[in-house]
Each structure stands twice: as C-alpha cells, then as structure tokens.
Image: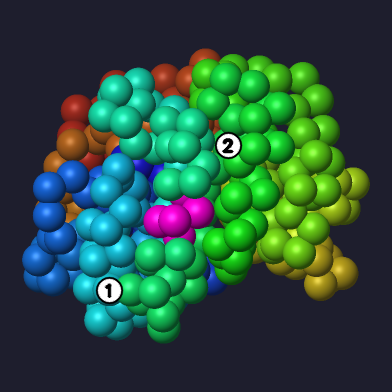
Amino acid sequence: MEGVTEGSFCAVMSRRALVRCWITPFIRLTTGVPRLVRLRSRLSVCTDSGLPVIVQVMGTDGGLLAATAARLASISGVVGIDLNCGCPSPIVLRNGSGGRMLQNPKWIRDTLLAIRDAAPTLGVSVKLRTGFEAPEEMRDILPLVAEAKPDFVILHFRTVRERYHEVPEGWRRFDTARALLPRTVLFGSGDLFDAKRCLELSDRHGLDGCAPARGLMRTPALCRDIETLCRGEACLPKVENMDFLREIAEEALLRGRTQTGFVLQLAGTMLGRESEAFHRLSHTRCLEELAAAL
C-alpha cells in the first residue's frame, strides 16, 4: 500500500501481532539494478519488523526485474518476490508498467520464469487484475500465468479501467479465475473490510484466501481476525481506534516526523471524516499536538 506501509504503521502493526508477514509497496525499476545498500534502506520499514518480507517489484524490463530479484535474495528477511501487474495508476500506465502488462500476458509468464531462475531460493508471486478493459481477458491472461507456476496469485476483481469504482457482484469473476487456475494458490482482493465476509467470499468462490489492502486502514486487526476465524476460534478483542492512532503518532514522533498528514489520513479512514473525533484531530497543528489530542 503505497504511502501507507511506512515506518510507524509497520512498527505498530508488527508489535501488536496484527500481521504475520509484509508485502512491500512496489519498487519501480526503470534503468538499472539498485545498489544493495539502497534496497536495504528502502525495505527497512518492513525488514526491521523481524517478519518475513515479500518484495513487490514493477517495471517493463524482465531482465532488470530478474537481476534485482537476485540481489534482493541476499537481504535477510526477504522470502519472496511479487510482480505487480495490476497497478491502475495513470502515471504507472503511461510508463507502460503495472496494469498495462495485462495486455502482454506472455511477458508476465516469461518475467515470472526469469525471476524464478535468477532467485531460486525465493518464492515468486504475481499481483493481477481481471483484465485491462474487460474481465473476459482473464481467459487469455491466466492460462499463460499458470505456465510460470507462481507460488500464488493475488487477483483483484476489478479491471484496470475500473480502478476503484463500484462493481456490483464483482467477486463473481473469481468463479472464472478459479476455473482457469485450478492448481494455483489463488488469493482474492478488492473491497475486503470484514473478516466474516472475507471467509464467506473465499468459500463461495473456491479461493485459497484473501489479500486485504485498504481494509487494514479501516480495521487494523482484519488479517488477525481472518486467521482467528479460519482456526474456528472466537474473535479477539477489537483494536480500539484511538489507542491505535495514538501509538502510530507516538511511533512517528520517535522516528523524527513532525507532520500530521499520514496519521490524519489514517484517522479519516478509521473514524470517518464526518465524525466529531476526526474534526477535532484535523485542527491540530503538529504531530506532537495530534498525539496529545489522541
């Protein structure tokens, strides 16, 4: 989650045992393999947690992506490479990467194979959408992806063109995806905000699991709650929003941050931008004042 998976958020989520691993925001590769010291610095917000880390990469040069994967394999804590072929950002699309690669599924297959060859000790996965223009494109995309035998596929039910717009019954598209990937571990993504619904949808459409993203900004304990339900156990106590936000703000202060932007963004999602609590927090002038208000 670009702009969300930063130091204080990762630290608090890890400390509270709300996640078991991290998939990083994408690293976009354009001209060369980044130096090892730069990669370590970029990934430190996740690797410092001590949890396993899957590094998401994105680009148009399969050889460059594979060479970077080989270098990433030497970083302690990195256990996998995730190829981003689903990002719908207009800037990313103009550069020909992310979701644009759904128009070239042979490239996706060949790049996954190249990453596997370059970094055989790491897991290999891919993030997709159900198509660029239309979900019918899955019939051309997914069989080629299956040829690369990824360890798992994360599939967002929207197409690239649909971005984050409402798609009624969008999860029905996973019935087609499951039929096209019968032997591939398949995680569904998109509009996942409630643990019980995540399990219901996964069971209904034959998926192996869910991959929530924006849902963690509304419900930080979502992954933990999904895991608890999968084990047939009672849900653990709810994470109190104000306590969680306070801990995020205090962690950010320890890391030398002073601006309120990220914490307010999180507060707006968790509390609701029309709430009295958010209105009060939005009038604070610095991060220290915001932490005290929480």
- At x 35%, y 21%, the residue is 90
**Secondary structure at numbered mark 1:** helix
Disc 1 crowd, CA 10 A, few/some/many (<14, 14-19, 20+): many
Magenta segment: does it hold 54? no
Main SS type for the magenta part? helix
Q: Quadrant of residue 208?
A: bottom right
- The amino acid type, in three-letter code, at marker 2 is Arg
Residue 284: which numbered mark, if any? none
> Badge 2: few (under 14), some or many (20 or more) residues near its Cα, within 10 Å?
many
In-image side of 51 versus 231 (left or right):
left
Specify the segment rendered in magenta.
108-112
Whether residue 281 is visible, yes or no, is: no
Residue 217 position within the rendered picture, expressed as x and y whole percent measured from the top left? 50, 41
Q: How many marks?
A: 2
Q: Nearer the viewer, residue 59 or 166?
A: 59
Name which residue lies at 70% across and 37% down. 139
The Cα–Cα distance between marks 1 and 2, rounded to whole angstroms, is 26 Å
For disc 1, the marked residue is: 70
Query: Disc 1 vs disc 2: Cβ atoms closer than 8 Å?
Result: no
